[in-house]
Image: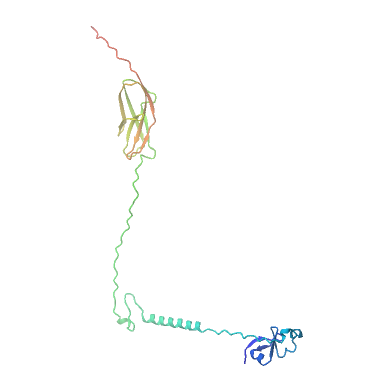
Amino acid sequence: MGKCIVHCAECGKAIREDDFSQSKAVAIENRTFCSGCREVAPDTQRTRKDSTRMRVPVPVPVARKSTLPLFAGGLTLGFGVVVLIGLSLFRPATGTMTRIGVPPAEQPATPVIRKAVPEIAPTIESRTPPVPAPLDAAPSIRLTSPLDGARFQSPADIVIEAEVGRRNGPVRVEFYHGPIKLGEADAAPYRWVWKGLRYPGNYELMAKLVGAQGESIESQKVWVWVDRGQPAVATRPAGR
């Protein structure tokens, strides 16, 4: 018995493939009618040129269900069962190996050797280069002698003295006339004497504080004047 492939366009009755060969169904202009509705089909459809042309619908192939997923699922399930059985037979204990088929009590104990790892304290090596210590947060130096505008007569001995404040570490004080270095002192009191100044004129004096790493700071500048001295007058001793 043929399978139902279409339905009647008039009454909806199922029409099988064998009904077309037994003249129990007819197709008119892509519309299928059963034997009962063939007589009531519209005359306009039967009078057209292709109304007498029988169009047998092509049977629609029925897709068969594949058994491959079922086979794959069964294979996966069977593999899982085998793995579970293998795990149940081989159960390694802590520090021992279990042989298949031998009771745990008869298993030879295999000692586990653990090597002691000595603890090494981490060492941190400082690679930061040493930073030279500054003179201090705010070093200071000033000339206390001579005073700015002082006058001397040639030949003159001028005492140049400086006062250092907030020093940090060993320092020295250098004394200058303009860019010319006159002398230096490395301990308090920071003093230097310019002796026998014979040339009249004005002179610029300055002191410089120098640290152990070469850092330096200058004092204020002072100006002094040297005047020409009075010539010595020869006197005759009394009684001559």
Which image quarter is the C terminus in?
top left
Query: Is 47 or 192 nearer to us in this picture?
Result: 47
Residue 173: percent from the left, percent from the top?
33, 33
- Which residue extends farthest right? 43
Residue 148 screen position, x and y as percent? 39, 26
- Most distant residue in the front direction: 49
**What colouring method underlies this structural image?**
rainbow
- Residue 62 in picture, x, y percent from top left: 58, 85
Q: Position of residue 129 (x, y in %)?
A: 34, 48
Q: Residue at x 43, y 81 (%)?
A: 79
Name the outermost residue toward the top: 240
Q: Quick one: 21 or 153, which is closer to the camera?
A: 21
Identity of the residue drawn at 66% across and 91% down:
21
The reply, left or right, for residue 196 in relation to residue 39 is left
Residue 188, compared with residue 61, is above or below; it is above
In the picture, the quarter occupied by the N terminus is bottom right
Please identify the residue farthest to the left as the structure is shown: 240
Q: Quadrant of residue 235?
A: top left
Please give left or right for residue 162 compared with residue 11 in the image: left
Q: Is residue 49 above or below residue 94?
A: below
Q: Residue at x 30, y 27 (%)?
A: 193
Give the mark count.
0
Q: Image quarter for residue 16?
A: bottom right
